[in-house]
Image: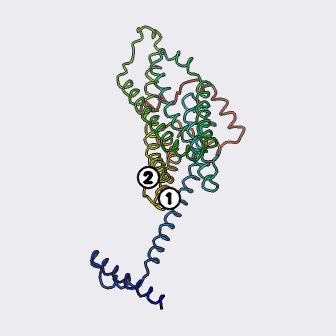
Amino acid sequence: MLSHKVSFDVLVARDRLATSVSSHFRLNHFDEVCFRICPVDQIVCRQSTMGSTLITVINYAAGVIAVLAVLENLLVMVVLAKTSHLRIKYFAFVFSIALADLVFSVMAIAFSINRARLFSALLQSSFFVSVLTILAVAVNRYLALTISPPSRYDALVTRCRLVVVCLLLWCFSLALHLLVIFVASNEVRLILSAWFRSPLILAVWIVTAVLYRFVFRKIKSYVPPLASSPGLSIPDDSEQAATRVRQTRRLLVTFSIILVTSFICWIPYNIGQIIKYFIETGQSTISDDIYNSYNTIAACVYCLSPAINPLIYWWRLDGFRQGFKELSCCCLLQKPEQLVETVDGNEDRQNTESTHWIKNDNK
């Protein structure tokens, strides 16, 4: 008898709710009848099922993007390693970013399968390396414009020293993130992720943007020196300086695009880290389902950056396009012995800053 009374009370409450919803949203008679017949828990269940389906689709999309990014960055690294005229000093930064994007994509796939702390640390470290490398490019190009004559810059900034700088960036980033992941407690990691790592990366972005702006202004105000100017008595130095300015302008435009793209892909995920801090500390009323949905979408956007960067290389770097075409033609048309002879015959071009840039920057 009691159960019948409870069921009757539930039906009365449902009818009142249906009448209220109908009057508020101006439902027609058919919609009101459907609302009365369909239980509320079934409606919530259907909405939950639709939400989980959307999240599943986004997860698969992120996986496809990560796999595509792995293939793209592997191709970039092969082209840079196998093409002789791309083995120049500042392309070491491109190789470092491609390696960082490759590690990021691989760790994103591994972390989706097994949420181990090591995978999370390597994923965050690789992205931080790419951020620091973009800053290093600006510093390198600033030195290229300020150190005169150009031969002095070539003697000071050697290929080995640039490789050492890239290795130091990797060591610093790995040490920073591995210590946080494996040594700090959960509470400390939560605080550092929201209020240390995110502001640190944002500060690096701001410093990089300011430095890029400063270098662009220096390029804009550049006046080619005369051959009789002090320190430039050799006419070739003046030509090298003008060529270096053209190289710097084109290279900085390329990395500025990478900077903006990476920032746009980065910002949603790190906003999610701040939201997570407020949820975990009980300072937010956002439900876990809403946060998980947002975090999944933000992580998918986060994975876009490593997939977009190789397309930027293809679009902006003429030397990369030429190297890819040469490598493809060599693999398809030449025998292995012929390929070795071709590479060996071009070794004398490696010590120049880039003959190819001179041709393309005059377009």
Residue 283's label in the rendered image is 2
Q: Inspect the image, locate mark 1, and give the three-letter code of the amino acid beneath it.
A: Asn
* Circle nearer the N terminus (1, 2): 2
Q: Residue 270's x, y, as percent?
A: 47, 47
Farthest residue, direction bottom: 1
Q: How is the image coloured?
A: rainbow
The secondary element bearing badge 2 is classed as loop
The secondary element bearing badge 1 is classed as helix
Q: Residue 13 lies in what quarter of the image? A: bottom left
Q: Residue 44's x, y, as percent?
A: 45, 73
Compared across the picture, whether 63 is left or right of 194 comes to right
* Front-lying residue, 321 or 34: 34
Please say whether residue 328 is visible from this viewpoint: no
Q: Residues within 10 Å of mark 1 (few under 14, many from 20)?
A: some
Farthest residue, direction right: 337
* Front-lying residue, 39 or 28: 39
In this rendering, the answer to whether 158 lies above or below 135 is: above
Q: Residue 92 lies in what quarter of the image? A: top right
Q: What's the residue at 53%, 46% (across, down)?
A: 190
Q: Residue 290's x, y, as percent?
A: 45, 60
Compared across the picture, whether 204 is left or right of 104 comes to left
Q: Which residue is mark 1?
A: 292
